[in-house]
Amino acid sequence: MDTDYKKSLEFLQGNGVYEEGMMVFLKGLKDSIWTHFDLFITDAKALAAIFMIIYFAIRSYEMMAGDKQLEIMPLLRPFGLVMVIMWWSAFAKVVAFPTDLVALKTEEMFNSEQTNVNNLRYTRADYMMKVANALYTYQAQTEVAEKESDSWYGRAWESVTSSVKEGISTVVTPIMELKNRLAVGMQLLMTQLLELLGIWILRIAVYIIFMIQIIYSSLLVILGPFAVAVSILPAFRDSFSTWIARFVSVNLYSGIGYLIMYLCSLMQKYALTSEIMKYKELIGADGSNANLEKMAWFAGNGVLSFGTVIVVFLIGAICMFTVPSISTWIISTSGITSASSSFGRNASTVLGAAKRAAGSIF
């Protein structure tokens, strides 16, 4: 592939289906936010101390009233919860460890397949450029043929019979029609814009899911000590277990997201391979054996793409938004699903307001 064209493709569409710089930024952002895990540790310790006094007062009153017998294990539970708050960083890392393993494994699967996809992207772009060059050549040839036919047609028109005129018309008209259909420049631009739109829709979907995961997990880590402290009271006993379920569910976003991206990479690989084979059918394996008839049909589509790759990008974007639902299938929790639904509704509201504002302006 031509080095300059490869650089221009990377400049236009990025160095991969998902930009490496953005993915590195998201990882760094998560690590940076997680360093603030101890932001409310002191407040949570103070709150836990108050709740422990309340809890022991309630238990003492129940035993003095004769409603409950002395039990040692329930009295040890508040101390265990306080130890969790004191060792909050280690505890959060232990809970997140299994999900980090899942994310690491699925990320390796994704990276191994994404390298093949990126290579196929460049190969397909090379064939697309060869098709465009072939169309440029045929366009120039048809322009020359049109000029020659015009000059000959003007000189000979008066001396021919009507039947001959019809024969000339059947020869010249397809040449002019072919010339019009081979207007390549605008088609190539439209193709690049459509592909850029498709790939950015996919990227935005991926970035949104990872940003949601970073925001939710960061809030759970920073505010989690309060959930542990509150669970000391009998009325909020389940808040700690609920926090663990939600934390594990949110941390699964990365692993599930990379797994879906891996499956989408397989679809992208198939789509790219399929279109490369079709391009080869148009111009040959080395780009020097173009089929004029098929090229004319292909150019008549309006874009220099078969559309398979663009559709696969859009399918991948849709699949990425299923990550929160899939996570709740594995770790059942209602809070994350409702939060994601609220996020989707608010995003739709903002998008609708933006469309109305744009409509009022234009």
Image (cartoon, grey):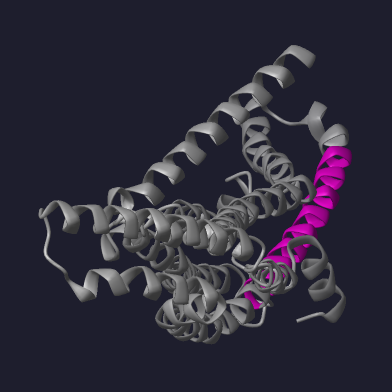
Say whether residue 295 is left or right of residue 126: left
Predominant SS along the magenta part: helix
| Residue 319, quarter of the rendered image | bottom left
Q: In the image, which residues are magenta?
A: 123-152
- In the image, residue 40 lies at what x, y percent? 63, 60
* 88 w.r.t. 191: above or below: below
Which one is nearer the viewer's eye here, 61 or 334? 61
Residue 306 visible in the picture: no
Q: Residue at x 53, y 79 (%)?
A: 87
- In the image, residue 305 lies at what x, y percent? 59, 56
* 88 w.r.t. 69: above or below: below
Residue 148 highlighted magenta (yes or no):
yes
Q: Residue at x 56, y 51 (%)?
A: 297
Which one is nearer the viewer's eye here, 189 or 342? 342
- In the image, residue 295 lies at what x, y percent? 61, 58
- In the image, residue 336 lies at what x, y percent? 40, 51
Q: Residue at x 59, y 56 (%)?
A: 215
